[in-house]
Amino acid sequence: MDHYLLFVNCVQALRRRTEALTIAMGGALGVAADPLPHQLATVRRILSDTDVRHLLSDEVGLGKTVQALMIINALRWQYPKHRTLIIAPDNLLAQWQEECWIRGHVMPALAGVASDKDAETAPVLLARPRDLVRRQGEVERTVELDSSKFDLLVVDEPQTMPRETVQTLSQAADSFRQVLVLSATPRLGDAVWRDLIIRMIEPAAAFRARFEEKSVSDVLAERETLVHSEEKTEASRNYLQFATTRRVVRNGRDGWGPYLPVRRNTEVRIQPLVAERERHEIAAELLRDVNYSADLQGRPWTFVRALQRSARAARDVLAEIAGQDGGLAEKAERARAASLDDPGDSRLEALLDLLSEEWEKDATRALIIVCGDNPTIDMLRTALPRYFPDLADRIGILRRPATAEIEAVTNLREVQETLAPFLDGSARLLLVGDWVQAGLNLHHAASRIVFYSMPWEMESIDQLIGRVDRLGSASRRKGRQRQVRIWRLVHDGAQEAAIADVAAQLGVFNAPLPPLSDDERKGVYELLSQAAITGAAPDGLTKINPETTGLVTSLGHLDPFTPPNAVADFDAWQKLPVVEPAMLKRREQGQIENSQGAMRSWLETITRSGDFEVGSKPDKLDPDFWFNTLWYYRLDGRGRPGHIPFPLPGTRAENWMSDHQPYIIERSRIPVPPRKTVITDSGEDTGRPLHFLDHGSLLHDALVEGYIAEGQKTFGKAQTLIHSTVTLPEGHSAKGQPPTMVTVAEFDPFPDEMLPPIWSPAAKTILAAAVSESQRLGLAADRLSLHFMARAVQRWVRFNVPAQLCKLGSSASGERWTDVPAEKIDSILRPLVFGSNIQCAKGRQPVRPVLRTDVVNAARRTQTEAMSARIRELDDKARAIIFPLADSFQSRLAFHWQEESRNRELVLERRKTAPADTGPRELRLGQIAALERSLEMSRLCEQESAALLKNFMATRRTPDLINPLSILLAFAEQS
């Protein structure tokens, strides 16, 4: 065995874990994405808060899903048993399935499809809104919102779900320890929806609002008045503890211009044909006696909308109007007949010109055409191949499914199958209705969208553009900015042209739509109805304010989460030193690139050590796409493994072909569109899951933890010191080094062993007094909430105090030992020399000990003691960093339980003062006793939460938490 390379691999494992705690932000940045400043700021904000309970309300296309995956990955990295339940609309499930695996290292289970075992054990379970409803003939729901089985509840795009479903989720969220709500337009301006959404992230305030029959907004506003009694505290503490918007995250495009696509929109105003103008005149007559309205639904609006579209789309409406009496009926009949005799469409000519111009520049360019309805889709599907024959089998179509179909799991597959030709480049056009909204990532395939017909809802325009105006891959973001082209084809004088003019003046085509208050939304739709009725946009319109969140706070001036602060934090993160010894061929510009380079070199060392076998292969169906493979080491690359240092998850040792694991490391190599599987052999029937090897990946973390465990078994302080003679390749910077003892240990400022136990003696006493299982479950839920709060403290400490990989070295010269500089230690622990070919140092067991046993043992004791002193010194520095910050954080920890205790006091008081004749006396006394125990536990949790940081700072690290690895190395020239 090469003990030198084994020691190097163990040190690299410790290096990876230290990197996870620092540069990778507790594992969050192990997700396969290159983070932007606003994403880094949001992830840090949420993970360092006292509770993970937030609304992510970033504008469309700013990466809410990726940020959620970063948070989930960090929570799983911190607590491997962590489980997440994601509730998302049907059209988002496929995206979540793909993103969870490709970027987030988790193959999620799908409710109603996965086996019972997978649904009960998968780290992530995906469910649809209808899975929460008990179906006819079924005893149970597909998914129970059970906080005893899941730690984190994620609700994506709740505004698209039935209100009854959101109400169910809002109520269930009370008992979940962690909640994330994702929505660019969460409808916080609507009082009913605001209460439902805010209850998920502010359950204590929502409870008090219900109890006192107030609105949540009023209760949150009252909470902000508490700031006046806290005038001496710092501004950020006041915001984080009391502000109405303390858990609402809203990032817009302002301030992030260099990182985002640029929109360029063009209006093509077309003179309508005679028949088209007649239809517009009929529409104007339908609206003649209609008042301005905030609701553009129902008749006559559906008729008016249809009359703006293709002749085929208008015929049914014209026929229905013609069946009525009066002059309008006669005009409608003439228009219907004209649509049959001459179904011309002036917009078609404009579209043909546009397509010709675009394809003349780039024949492979793909475009999305918004058709508005199925008849217009059918018309274009038939007409376009007449002018562009190669489009005959290169047009994708995405229609609005029936409601029942939308809810079907099979429809998800159908949508993906429909989009596949467009996403892989074999289709050049995608014809859609106006329903394609949140959940479809089309930016990989197209950056151009044409509104052949205009949606009349601002949210639909916003979401449709948002399918192509999204953050691209890291490799695509480098260099010049990506441009998104938007065209709107409108008939001059048509009602739809007036609608488009209002949308343009409000800024909807130029930037994502911000959340609107109830009054703002009503005002926008009254403007739209006014424009349609009068045939022109009102004068004096201004752009909608993009800064609004739909919530009002008086503490906005105290908000520490500003774009300048985010940029400053991002710059500071970029300047963090690389955790050494990183075996980098060259220093890169960014943290992500350095991390990937160091990982690549570690895998090279693992291969050279003979522990595992790393190879590379092209995909059998796509030879241009190469990936790496990992399996156990085989002599000469044949047969079965001869040595397995430790097993890898899901990796058998029977046969390379059937058991090896494919993976990639570089984010820039994630294919576009992303793919979950690869074909490694022509005989395979199905693809093999493609791992992304980084923090949070089971495969990656198994390598890290496996080598750390091997290090303790072979080089730990309880083991006999290993001697190894090392032969260095030419050009290695450690040549000429005398015999050297190296000791390495990691410093985690808050290791798991320092977390308090879930049950304190006082808590056990309260539990023992509970007389029913339901009471015990309630008390246990409190303790688990407190435990998750302790983990929040752990994350907060780790964010504020950097972990370190500590190294000590001593070289022997006769009877004397000399300290070795850190740079030289790093050099010794880098076995690779890069050149035209990579050369690697090798170790072997010496024929006789390098130095006398008594000399070596004395030096090792000295070095181990010095390492313990170094760790204790870092502990003292950690406390010095935490001390000035502790009061603010402790206050926020206790405030959570203060609110909870106050609510329980209200319930207890109401029960005590209720008339005595309501129910049996024994039942009443039992209920009062249970409520008193619940209040007692809440008050205990309040005391213990306030003491979490205090106890951490008072606790001294015990010797068993310092676990150095040591080795004695001699070099071939001196052996």
Image (tube, rainbow, N blue to C red):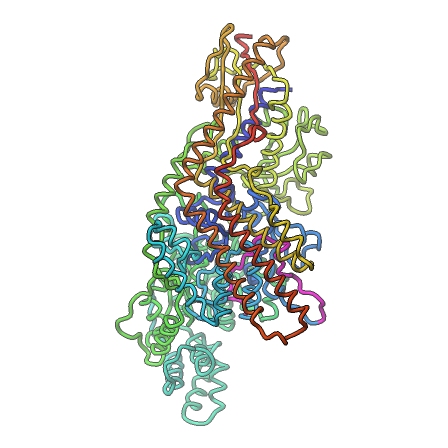
Q: Is residue 107 above or below residue 699?
A: below
Instruction: Choose top left, top right, bottom left or bottom right for residue 961.
Output: top right
838 relative position to 266: left or right: right
* Boundaries of the magenta span: 137-162
Q: Residue 299, how many percent across, how many down?
A: 46, 83
Q: Nearer the viewer, residue 742 or 683?
A: 742
Residue 126 falls in image quadrant: bottom right
- Is 453 or 804 nearer to us in this picture? 804
Give the answer, above or below, for where 398 lies relative to 958. Answer: below
Residue at x 52% of width, y 30% of height = 746
* The furthest residue to the top: 814
Q: Is residue 378 magenta?
A: no
Provide the major secondary structure of the magenta segment: loop
Residue 186, placed above or below residue 670: below
| Residue at the extreme bottom of the image, as rendered | 326
Q: Nearer the viewer, residue 611 or 509?
A: 611
Image quarter hosting the N terminus:
top right
Res 685 seen here: yes
